[in-house]
Amino acid sequence: MVSNLTNKAAGHQYTLGLRYQPAEALALRVSHAKGVLPPSPSQLVPVAFPGFPGTVDPKRGNTTLVSAGGWIIQGNPDLEPEQSSSWSAGAIFTPSRLPGLRLSADYTRISKTDEIAGLTSYRDLVLERDELFPGRVVRAELTPADAQLGYTGGEIQLFDLSNFNLASTRVEAWDFQADYSWQTALGTFSANLIATHATEYAVQVVSTIPVAEYVDYALSGGPLGWRGNGGLTWERNAWAASWNMQYYGSYWAYTVTASPAATALSQGSETIPRQSYHDLFFRYRFDETMGFARGFLAGSEVSFGVANVLDTSAPLVAVSSPTDGVGGGGYSKFADPRGRRFSLSWRKSFQ
């Protein structure tokens, strides 16, 4: 079967940037951009789908949808192109009195209209408020038997979860970075620290419902309020060692539309605790100038690493009920449930 779809998009795009250095150690920058992103071919072609296990119909006593008559996901030939407007500003500080130090801070704000999203992420909202999504949920007439059971909607004949255009999206975040390197008699040391602070991730699905804030709603696809990593590296001749730390702030243990009380019953808390993981890495490089390293070992290096050296346990995400939006449970997506892990590798370069 061959489908012929037509979707036309037009728009204007530009980027303006300015950099100003009021002092040798300080540089300021600001930029503004407008963008247009048309839908890709894969986002335009509808695909039939058998359904999502565990999906329930709130208008029919939370009964499970088996087939819902028919499901449609992915493509939508009527998609509009995404429109975006962004502002960013930042500062870089490199003091001459402390060579090797670089500090930077950047602010970013992005506003989008008609952002293309998969409606599968909002299927519970569509089922609860199908009047806000015309044509997405096609139901049979409500029968007298349905009414006696307290149902408020007929059986679903078609459930269209194909891509659609969000009314608006706003993103606001701060990025911080510090780098410092210095020479000593023991070798060269380098330290770095990177942190991101998300202050807004506001999504309005359709213009007739309030804006929802997604910061710290990781189970709904939102960003963490705080996350970062830092490290320290030492190098001397053929030797190198490094330590790295990853940090993830705490986040809500439920989705934007879920019940905090229901989640707390199974999770034991409304939040997933903050997490930090530490890694160690060691390396030795064989140099051709070393007599014992000539021949086969020349140009090779041996590396040894320990991930999650403190063997920190991955936080669990519980399941409280089929309708709370928590999903199938398991472990925090920012963690590795395998705990402490070791690696040993040997690499050789040939010229």
Image (cartoon, helix red, strand yellow):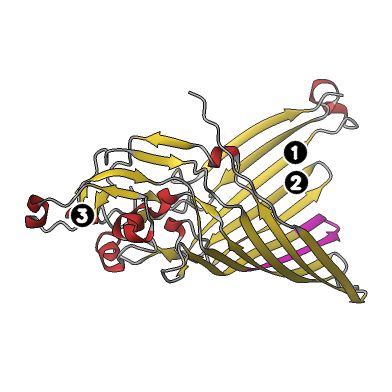
How packed is label 3: few (under 14 Cα within 10 Å), some, or many (20 or more)? some
On residue 179, the disc is none
**Amino acid bearing label 2:** Ala
Point out the tag, 1 or 2, that comes first from the N-terminus.
Answer: 2
Residue 177 is inside the magenta segment? yes
Judge depth for marks 3 and 2 and give the one in front: 3
**Residue bearing mark 2:** 240
Q: Quadrant of residue 102?
A: bottom right
Point out the tag, 3 or 2, that comes first from the N-terminus.
Answer: 3
Residue positioned 65% across, 49% down in the render: 9
Point out the tag, 1 or 3, that comes first from the N-terminus.
Answer: 3
**Amino acid bearing label 3:** Gly
How packed is label 1: few (under 14 Cα within 10 Å), some, or many (20 or more)? some
Q: Where residue 314 sits: x, y (%)?
A: 43, 52
> Main SS type for the magenta part?
strand
**Residue bearing mark 1:** 284
On residue 153, the disc is 3
Name the image quarter holding the C terminus.
Answer: top right
Residue positioned 88% across, 67% down in the render: 99
Residue extent of the magenta highlight: 173-190
**Amino acid bearing label 1:** Tyr
